[in-house]
């Protein structure tokens, strides 16, 4: 007990000592934060009047707020504060919806019972339960049975599930029944697809394991979709695409842009009735939805899509009788050559974030709404910007965001998290050089192309880690970088 108490006191004293060291360090040099400008390309005068705000912290207790104005001749100005409670930054919660095949959670990998045996009663709750039960019946004790079954003999349309995340919900009807309604509503045909099943039984006749996968008749199909929160509901766009070629697939399904109204009873909970879904409009033929955003003020819906000839930005206006396609603008078409064979591996890996190894073709990363326009980004740091003038949009410029270090594209933050400001004559873009870095890359563009690119090195980059395994000084809100850019 005495030893444990001494160890506890040692760790407490160690923690307090590291905090005191940090506060002493700040007191000695809180005004010494220096921002050093490194010109990467162009003329720094193009960034005149731009102020970078770089908030940083040490372990959520020591907080700095640093501002640097480009071309002012003044150094960085910092404010310091101490919080005895560890400050935390929460990621914003985005409401999203997704449609999927029921078999996605079961088939495509081996499934072995780890709790004993599969009972016949359990098969009824599995996707395609009646097909599985039939396969189990055909399997003799002590044998392994392999069978290929045409799905349409049992199901004309794929059974679907609908996922809603980011908001408190309460389903009005039974969820399974609602998903059954959506199965008929979207009617995605099973066509010539087959279930490939392998069932294994022990000598006593108990089912021990099975493996299941879907064999697609004409290329593996997947659901490509996107969503955006509306007024007490959610917009949802989907189509089918070939998993290998990434081309749009038409099986006669009901695809397009839909709206699910989810009214609230004043308790902050959406009361979800999936059977109230309504179709707003068709997607442009051949268009695969990538990302959707909505501007509540203008009541516009923005949809980034991939087509065979390249990428496009679709702009819809909300009207009384549904959505109306107001404009469709081609963007960054140079990123696609019409050959989609490389895209499967690249886009399958995109969820891993900035550290992906880029393939021969960049993949779409994000769409960002800003005052005066829309920014779209790709994984290699390329972008397109569509500017607004009197409610109409035009492709204003394309470009490549400069990397802070040669060959360091695998860690750049810009395609996923950035700051975008448009003043009518200049497009200003900024992002941290890398994740957890305090260095900032700033770029200025005109319609003719890049005017300036600069790296702003922060003197606390990689600074003192406090010892004893404590984290170093990093941007506030580490995963939700709070970098700001203003123009005066």
Image: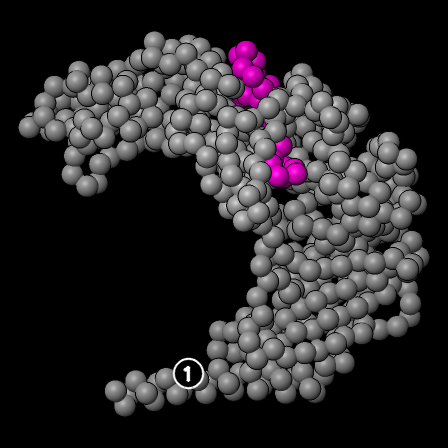
Name the colour scheme.
Answer: one colour
Along the line of sight, which residue is nearer the eye, 359 or 116?
116
Q: How crowded is mark 1: few (under 14 residues within 10 Å), some or many (20 or more)?
A: few
The answer to whether residue 323 shows anywhere in this view is yes
Residue drawn at 75 percent across, 43 percent down: 369
Instruction: Say which element carries label 1.
Output: helix
Residue occupying the far left of the picture: 204
> Is 384 one of the magenta-colored residues?
no
Residue drawn at 61 percent across, 26 percent down: 258
Pick the quarter of the image with the C terminus: bottom right
**The residue stretch that appears in magenta:** 227-255
The answer to whether residue 382 shows anywhere in this view is no
Along the line of sight, which residue is nearer the eye, 463 or 427?
427
Percent x, y of residue 192: 42, 10
- Picture quarter containing residue 331? top right
Up/down of 423 relative to 90, above or below: above
Percent x, y of residue 141: 10, 22
Percent x, y of residue 263: 58, 38
Along the line of sight, which residue is nearer the eye, 407 or 17?
17
Residue drawn at 92 percent across, 45 percent down: 425
Percent x, y of residue 371: 82, 46
Question: How many numbered discs sit on the rendered protein?
Answer: 1
Up/down of 418 relative to 183, above or below: below
Residue drawn at 73 percent across, 41 percent down: 296
- For label 1, the residue is 11
> Is 236 one of the magenta-colored residues?
yes
């Amino acid at each position: 007990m005495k030893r444990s108490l001494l160890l506890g006191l040692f760790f407490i004293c160690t923690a307090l000592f590291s905090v005191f060291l940090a506060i002493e360090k700040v007191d000695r040099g809180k005004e010494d934060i220096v921002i050093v400008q490194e010109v990467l390309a162009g003329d720094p005068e193009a960034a005149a009047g731009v102020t970078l705000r770089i908030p940083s912290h040490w372990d959520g207790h020591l907080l700095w707020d640093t501002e640097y104005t480009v071309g002012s001749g003044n150094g960085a100005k910092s404010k310091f504060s101490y919080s005895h409670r560890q400050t935390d930054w929460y990621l914003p919660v985005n409401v999203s919806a997704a449609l999927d095949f029921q078999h996605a959670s079961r088939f495509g990998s081996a499934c072995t019972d780890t709790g004993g045996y599969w009972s016949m009663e359990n098969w009824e709750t599995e996707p395609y339960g009646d097909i599985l039960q039939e396969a189990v019946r055909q399997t003799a004790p002590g044998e392994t049975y392999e069978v290929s079954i045409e799905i349409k003999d049992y199901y004309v349309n794929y059974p679907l599930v609908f996922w809603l995340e980011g908001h408190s919900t309460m389903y009005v009807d039974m969820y399974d029944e609602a998903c059954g309604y959506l199965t008929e509503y979207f009617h995605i045909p099973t066509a010539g697809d087959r279930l490939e099943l392998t069932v294994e039984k022990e000598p006593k006749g108990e089912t021990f394991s099975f493996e299941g996968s879907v064999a697609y008749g004409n290329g593996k199909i997947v659901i490509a979709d996107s969503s955006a929160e509306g007024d007490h509901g959610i917009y949802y766009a989907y189509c089918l695409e070939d998993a290998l070629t990434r081309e749009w697939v038409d099986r006669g399904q009901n695809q397009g842009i839909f709206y699910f109204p989810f009214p609230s009873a004043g308790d902050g909970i959406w009361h979800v009735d999936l059977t109230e879904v309504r179709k707003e409009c068709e997607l442009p033929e051949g268009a695969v939805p990538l990302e959707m955003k909505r501007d509540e003020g203008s009541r516009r819906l923005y949809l980034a899509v991939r087509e065979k000839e390249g990428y496009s930005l679709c702009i819809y206006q909300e009207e009384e009788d549904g959505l109306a396609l107001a404009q469709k603008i081609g963007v960054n078409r140079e990123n696609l050559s019409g050959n989609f064979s490389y895209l499967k591996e690249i886009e399958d890996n995109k969820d891993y974030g900035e550290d992906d190894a880029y393939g021969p073709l960049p993949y779409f990363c994000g769409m960002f709404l800003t005052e005066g326009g829309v920014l779209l980004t790709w994984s290699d740091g390329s972008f397109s910007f569509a500017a607004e003038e009197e409610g109409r949009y035009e492709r204003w410029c394309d470009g490549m965001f400069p990397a802070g270090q040669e060959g360091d594209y695998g860690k750049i933050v810009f395609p996923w998290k950035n700051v975008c400001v448009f003043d009518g004559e200049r497009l200003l873009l900024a992002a941290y050089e890398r994740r957890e870095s305090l260095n900032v890359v700033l770029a200025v563009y005109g319609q003719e192309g890049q005017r300036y690119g600069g790296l702003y090195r922060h003197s606390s980059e990689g600074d003192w880690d406090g010892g004893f395994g404590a984290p170093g000084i990093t941007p506030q809100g580490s995963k939700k970088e709070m970098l700001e850019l203003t123009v005066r």
